[in-house]
Amino acid sequence: TLNKRIKEREGVHDLQLWEEEQTKRAKATAGLRTERVQEGDYEYVFDEASKVSFLDGGGIPASQQTKELQAFKEQLEAAISAETSLQEGRKKLPLYAMREEMVQAMRDYQILIVSSETGSGKTTQIPQYILEENLAGGLTIACTQPRRVAAMSVAARVAEERGARLGGEVGYSVRFENKTTPGVTKIKFLTDGMLLRELQDDPTLSQYGAVMLDEAHERTISTDVLGVLLKDLARARGLETEQPLRIIISSATMNADKFSQYYDGAPLFFVPGRTFAVNTLFTQNPEANYLQAAITTVMQTHISQPLPGDILVFLTGQQDIDEACEELEATCKKLGNRVAPLIICPIYATLPSEVQAKIFEPTPKGCRKVVVSTNIAETSLTIDGIVFVVDCGLEKSNSVSNGISSLQTQPISRASAVQRAGRAGRVRDGICMRLYTEYAYSHELEEEPIPEIQRSNVESLVLQLKSLGVDNLLDFDFIDAPSAESLMGALESLYLLGALNSQGEVTRLGRKIVEVPSSPQLAAALIASANFGCTQEVLTIVSMLEESASLFYRPKDQKVHADSARQRFTHKEGGDHLTLMQVYNTWVEADYSITWCKENFVQYRSLQRARLVREQLEALCERIEIPPETTCGAGDYDKILKALLSGFFANTATLTRDGRHYRTLSGKIQTRIHPSSVLAANDQAYLPKLVMYSELRVTSEEWMSNVAPIEASWIGEVAPHFWKKAKGDGVEERKKLPKGQGRAA
Ligand code: CDP
Ligand code: MG
């Protein structure tokens, strides 16, 4: 490709055009964007990876080459030498030593399990080997990732290694964002959920010649289910058929045997890692506050340990991480130049990608980097230079009980603890500092993590499987099956939603719901909006709900300002849903301004994403046969709430006698309005009698988040059979109250 590139470079023949193109390139690279621009006969390619660009056309005599052209050439040469060193780097990876054997094994066996330490090169190299050895028969190679961040960052890395434009030979596809070119993209990184969606349209995955299920040990629902479906597909597209499908299951060392057994003894290819010894330390006594303990440990390590040697800290979620980063920054400021500069990098899934990219930048000499991460850095991201690991022993993970799923902070498993510690031994002997006791490690942690499928709500999954033609879920060959109770619960709610009929078959509505890449409830609300003539409004709310958790921020020193800014959007009568809409609409009126976001303490990134999601959902409307343009205006919020209720009727709760708590209609669970809701600020006397919420969050109590007041008659209107059932359980119908003051009375 390098020679081809030079040839393309020689193609420069029109200097004026070339200069224009340079300006564009400067603009393009400033935002680190890759773009392809067609102008007349010329095509400009702005290449993110190598930061060089070229255009097709005739030739230019060497004598006419100008200074700029010379500079361009030098730039190109620099890019080429950077690529050469990348190529050398590829050869140093543990996987490279096994390349021949591995390629041979892939030729011999259709399904191969590959297991190695994190950082050996599985994710970045295996798809390239398959491409280089033409093992996919010219078709695309899919490599699935449980997380969108990993899919995007690894695609960028592999594109760079191949000197390719991101979105060209190497691309990615994650929910609401597709960077691939059909027919051109040969290596496609995509989230496991996206591949599962692709199966809906193309049940044999005919565009792929190889699928690598990466990070299979994480046991996400989508990866697990893909694993089952691929087992079948492997039979249909065996090595002897015209279009064989090769399957690689890639896993960190845990769980590898389990996969081999599942695939009827598929060969297990183990790649010995290049790891150093890690000295593991425990705390003597349990820590009362793991966050403070983590911060102190980082500062002590930074001050006492020699440079270089970066630190990786595992915390639980965005809130923790932001808080820790703020505090570390403040402490460093106080210490001033008495300590070496500490570069503080947060990382979690919802962080914007430019900020994420910071964690991969090499640490400058004389500095130390501290990466503060969720469990995302446990296996799916490799950060070079880490010598110290600080492990709080906790993670946020989903669990489900009585049909309510909740994201809770829970102890990690021993397997995860080992994995975390291993991150310290990649460059030299390292140290892992565990903020829990040795006793807790050996007596209180589970051996292995519980697969996601057994601790989540499986509604989406059940509907997807049903629409793929899986009739009997109880007989489905799950790797680890969800409980019968959780399957039945999902079938029941899908039936109430109208997505399945009484025979358990997917209805017309169900088919539409499957098309929408959101939860079945949000999809149903969007589809119902057509009946109420408010699709524009519901599109906004649905997109904003996806971002609502990370929308507002409250900097420590400006809490009052942040709260009063928020107050301005508060829509008391319409609750959180209409408040979200108000935020979005005001932002649109402010011309999508960043400054506006800063002034109002709203995350620009979240709004940007909501905008992107909204665009995609709007474009999808046609496919699910709803006219996207209907609008009722914000004043007519009854209609909007009714449309939403059409999806969320099962998430409703009535105020109890104590005037503070609510009881859910479907599960009779005692709950309260989460303090982050605009309704939570209501005086107790004004709490609505009946509310709808988007989810229950369980911490020390059960909280409803994203809450809106509704009227009892609406439930009967949008979900008659649910209402009949709820009434059967003793909920009496309330008189419809006059609009406006009524609902809060
Ligand atoms: O999949 P596995 O954990 O076995 O390794 P990998 O993700 O393919 O990483 C191989 C090497 O590529 C790592 O050691 C990193 O140095 C490098 N890499 C990177 O620099 N940037 C990325 N986004 C991903 C990998
Ligand atoms: Mg990997």
Image (cartoon, helix red, strand yellow):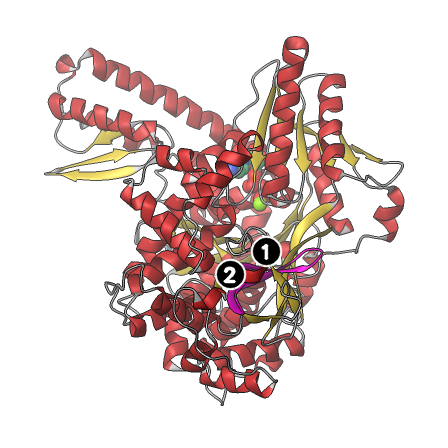
**Can you say whether 337 is above or below 612 in the image?**
above
- 718 in relation to 19, above or below: below
* Residue 445 x, y percent position in the rendering: 81, 52
Up the image or down, 85 lies above or below 374; here it is above
Q: Where residue 391 appears, x then y in whole percent?
A: 73, 39
Q: Residue 674 carries which label?
A: 1
Earlier residue among tags 1 and 2: 1
Amino acid, disc 2: Val
| Nearer the observer, 694 or 115 | 694
Residue pictured at 46% horizontal, 73% vertical: 711
Q: Does the magenta stretch include residue 521?
A: no
Picture quadrant where residue 33 is located: top left
Residue drawn at x 38%, y 69% as measured from the top left = 739
Element at badge 2? Answer: strand
Instruction: Give the magenta range.
Output: 686-707
Q: Where is residue 178 in the image (x, y as percent from the top left)?
A: 36, 51
* Res. 171 in view: no
Q: Residues within 10 Å of mark 1 (few under 14, many from 20)?
A: some
- Residue type for callout 1: His
Let me know if residue 610 appears in the view.
Answer: yes
Magenta-span inclusion, residue 694: yes
Q: In which quarter of the image is ligand 1?
A: top right
Secondary structure beneath label 1: loop
Q: Which mark is residue 707?
A: 2
Q: Quadrant of the N terminus?
A: top left
